[in-house]
Amino acid sequence: MDIQLLDEYVALNALWLKRDETGQIRIWRSFLFEFTATGEDRYNGKIIMLGKRIETIQLEPHRIG
């Protein structure tokens, strides 16, 4: 995605149990972080995981360097 994680900081935002597509119970986690694409501006991002699989990556609209 050609972005850089800032401050080496990723925060666990939410955590609970959820069933996956096969019916297995997995840990659902939401992580928040800050990133840059240009080295000048800061933006927020969010990753949602179910078990070890990434479900969603959300990035604020940002300038591409």
Image: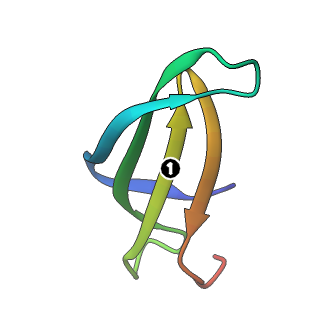
Q: Position of residue 49 (x, y in %)?
A: 53, 37
Residue ID at (55%, 20%): 52
- Asked whether, in this view, residue 57 is left or right of residue 16, the answer is right
Q: In the image shown, does 39 or 24 lie closer to the viewer? A: 24
Q: In the image shown, does 40 or 45 lie closer to the viewer? A: 45
**Residue 24 quadrant:** top right
Q: Number of labelled discs?
A: 1
- Asked whether, in this view, residue 11 is left or right of residue 39, the answer is left
Q: In the image shown, does 51 or 43 lie closer to the viewer? A: 51
Residue ID at (65%, 42%): 55
Judging by the rendered image, the residue that carries numbered circle 1 is: 47
**Residue 40 quadrant:** bottom left
Characterize the local packing of mark 1: few (<14), some (14-19) or many (20 or more) Cα atoms within 10 angstroms: some
Q: Position of residue 47 (x, y in %)?
A: 50, 50
Q: Position of residue 39 (x, y in %)?
A: 43, 71
Q: Is 21 rendered above or below residue 59?
A: above
Q: Is 16 rendered above or below residue 25?
A: below
- Asked whether, in this view, residue 26 is left or right of residue 29, the answer is right
Residue ID at (55%, 69%): 37
Q: Amino acid at mark 1?
A: Ile
Quick one: quadrant of the C terminus? bottom right
Quick one: quadrant of the N terminus? bottom right
Residue ID at (58%, 64%): 58
Q: Position of residue 53 (x, y in %)?
A: 63, 27
**Element type at marker 1?**
strand
